[in-house]
Amino acid sequence: MRMKSLKHKVAKKVHQKACVDACGAHALHDEETQSVKSVVSSDVLADVDTGISVESPSSTAGLAAFFPSFNDFYVSPDICEAAACEIRTLCSKHHVAEDTLFLGKCISLDRGFPLICTKTATIRCEFSALLTKSKSEKNVVVGDWLIVGIPCNHEMGIMYKILPRVHTVSRWRGDSRAQMQVLAAHVDIVLLVQPFMRAGLDLARIVRTAVIAQDCGCSCAVVCTKVDRVGLSQYKDALMTLSALLATQIEIVVSSQDLHFMESAASYKEFAVEHGIHWGASEILQLVGSKTCAMLLGESGAGKSSLLNLLLKRPVQRIGSTRSKDDSGRHTTVSRQMITLPSAGCIIDCPGLRTLPLMGHEAGLAQTFPLLTVAVEHCKFRNCSHKKEPGCAVRALESSQHVFSGSIDIYVALLDEMNSSAHMLDKDISHRYI
């Protein structure tokens, strides 16, 4: 028991040292240089006597040079007003010194404390009692605007309040209380990363992700990676089907980490340009304008890390392999981080998502399929399932040139899934979604 207690104490001290070192690794100097103050030499801190090893949050030190500064963000009037109000409250009711309070943005979440960027410093911050006991939102996500305190002679900042969120990208946790997992906040554009596979493109996955992205109120674009893996004929068929499915509402970008292929595949590029499809990762920079926040969203193995390396023009993210039998990838990104793109805005890199259950995303479905959503109102029966009922206005569009026939089946399947998910909820809240 004594040995176990000793190991626990040593592990706790090592973890505290790791957090302090990581704070130093990410604390930046003044606003002009934004250089890293110090970097921990090893990603793993080990205690020789006990054999305990603790992974340090400093594993993100390689990306520290690409972390955004405060001037890289657009601060809306609503955020400015909310920040001023919260600072007045903290000063008057909780007697916090006003000169220690700052507006900050969460730019990284890993195994350590959240990394917050302010006008004066980028620093690791701990949770205040006010935040942990708050009845409002208390879980910090990347992209959040917060009120933080940076007291003198204090190794870490203190998070006091999360400001109201907009454009939150979230997914249903699958529980009976309709709880949503917020992946990121204040996102302007979501980049749906989908690789070319042996069978082409996973259209159902693309639409599912687009529904979630558009449900948060931001724009989105599809980035088709690994184009070098398919032949020209399969490539053309896949892009034509995707274009018809999205009905030119969502931008499409074709990319590959094989730069030689991208430079030499003239027929591939010509086809893309002829059909209004962007060619190459550099086109993404035009979609992510200055002071704009983008988010990479895709499953493991989709090529998100490779894409980020292409955009940054250097290998800053570790790349994993995929299984040959089903093209499934393994998790290589284990943290959520905001990165500054060259001559563009910022991008949030997230771990891959294997599942994206839908529940309560009717607004996103309506934006993805506007014509079908309008047609639903003209069905003969109010509870029409859009399958075999007579007088179904949705199925009547199958012969229309304005709607891709495959989109109807996908639309109906996702609508059925959301209805089924709503019926899984507890009775006291299910009426909100049915």
Image (cartoon, helix red, strand yellow):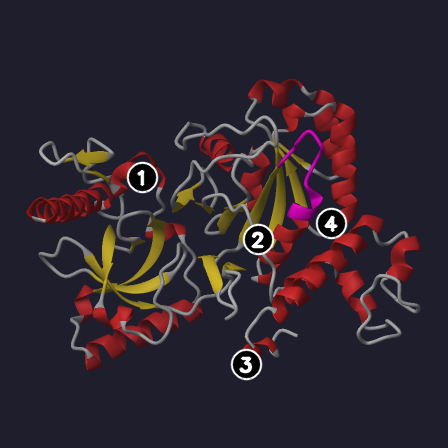
Say which residue label 1 marks: 60
Say which residue label 2 marks: 356
In this rendered view, identify the residue nearer to me: 117 or 235. 235
Say which residue label 4 marks: 246
Asked if residue 304 lies left or right of residue 157, the reply is right
Q: CA distance from mark 2 to mark 3?
A: 24 Å
Sooner in the amino-acid sequence: mark 3 or mark 1: 1
Residue stretch in magenta: 195-205
In the rendered image, the vertical position of residue 227 relative to residue 110, given as above or below: above
Say which residue label 3 marks: 428
Sooner in the amino-acid sequence: mark 4 or mark 3: 4
Magenta includes 290? no
**Mark 1 falls on what kind of element?**
helix
Q: CA distance from mark 4 to mark 3?
A: 37 Å
Q: CA distance from mark 2 to mark 4?
A: 19 Å
Magenta stretch, main secondary structure class? loop
**Observer able to see residue 371:** yes
Q: Position of residue 75 (x, y in %)?
A: 41, 61
**Mark 4 falls on what kind of element?**
helix
Sooner in the amino-acid sequence: mark 2 or mark 4: 4
The image shows a total of numbered marks equal to: 4
Asked if residue 45 lies left or right of residue 396, the reply is left
Sooner in the amino-acid sequence: mark 2 or mark 3: 2
Query: Residue drawn 79% across and 74% down?
Result: 383
Q: Position of residue 24 (x, y in %)?
A: 18, 44
Q: CA distance from mark 1 to mark 4?
A: 36 Å
**Observer able to see residue 184:** no
Depth-wise, is mark 4 or mark 3 nearer the camera? 3
**Residue 290 marker:** none
**Mark 3 crowd level (few <14, some 14–19, many ≥20, 10 Å Cα):** few
